[in-house]
Amino acid sequence: MKRLLQYLAGSWTFMVMSNAQKRVFSIKIPRAIGYLFTLFILSLGTALFFTYQQANSLETNSQTLSHKLTDKQEELKSLQSKYQTLLTNANQTKQKIDKLVTLQQEMNQLVSDDTQLHKGMGGDSLNIEQLNYSSDEQSKKSEKVEDLQTIQQSIPSLVNEYKETVSELKSVQKELARLPSIWPTSARKITSRFGGRTDPFTKSISHHKGLDIAGPYRTEIYATADGRVNEARRNGGYGNFISIKHSSEYTTQYAHLDEIFVEPGEKVKKGDKIGAMGTTGRSTGVHLHYEVLINGEHVNPLPYVLVGQ
């Protein structure tokens, strides 16, 4: 140990000579400082290497999640488009049915009037000339009866078509209801986005797993899709926290709430009030921290709230 200290107490001498005609400069550097400087350079290089590796890994994960999110966005848009098409088809079919039913009622009335007319023929007080019941009119009456039969045959198939469309419409409606596609609060001020950011407490770069939305104290928080409450409790840095399972794929999470309005196991509908905005847990001010997870992996919530606008 003494020898090591004696060795470190020594120094290295470096000779600096610009050319043969000028004097030589000598620089002495204590060995201890030299070793510390070398250790510092090695530590810095190692830290930079691991930081680069971590950043590269985050970038790769981010790209993977981005592709998944794009697929889910396309799926959501496709469902919304399909829903609108089915809704239009259902309305058009319903209008056809209504028109046919109205026409059937009119034809029934005409046939009824014609029957009453025949019942009156042959009476002593009835003037046949007043009836003016020509063969052409008889033909028209027959055509109306045939039209009525055609209408009666058309209505069942249209009703079945309508029922099938409505059934498919309800199925798509259920799928849309389970997708988180609305803002979780009426506030719209985004203070921190998904992804890399400077942590407000440690001041170091970290991955932000959700979307921070600031608003007035106790602003109402809404479920962004139909589902069942998984958790509703105090959860460390999240403060008052709610987790809702919407399907086998989708889960949403809400943090830093001032108050929780739901219980674990409770079923909720899209747009239901589930809590009030606050600043509980690891928080620097009143806001909602909102997360969307697909198969347990955090994704950017912003496209989901924007697509529902």
Image (tube, rainbow, N blue to C red):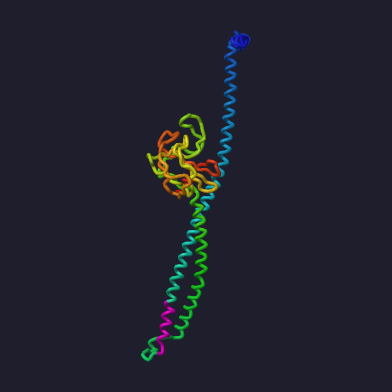
Considering every residue shown, the one lying at the far bottom of the view is 124
Residue 32: give x, y in percent of width and height: 58, 13
Q: Is residue 182 magenta?
A: no
Taken as a whole, is the magenta stretch helix, strand or loop? helix
Q: In this view, does 97 lie above or below 248?
A: below
Report whether residue 177 is seen.
yes
Residue 54: give x, y in percent of width and height: 57, 32
* Residue 105 quadrant: bottom left
Q: Residue at the location (38% across, 87% down)? A: 130
Considering every residue shown, the one lying at the far left of the view is 125
Front one among 260 and 216: 260
Q: Residue at the location (41% across, 85% down)? A: 119
Q: In this view, does 110 lie above or below 32?
A: below
Q: In this view, does 186 lie to the left or right of 24?
A: left
Residue 196: give x, y in percent of width and height: 51, 35
Residue 44: give x, y in percent of width and height: 57, 24
Q: Residue at the location (43% across, 71% down)? A: 102
Q: In this view, does 155 lie above or below 237?
A: below
Q: Residue at the location (42% across, 77% down)? A: 109
Q: Is residue 229 above or below residue 146?
A: above
**Bounds of the magenta span?**
109-122
* Residue 60 quadrant: top right
Q: Which image quarter is the N terminus in?
A: top right
Report whether residue 15 is seen.
no
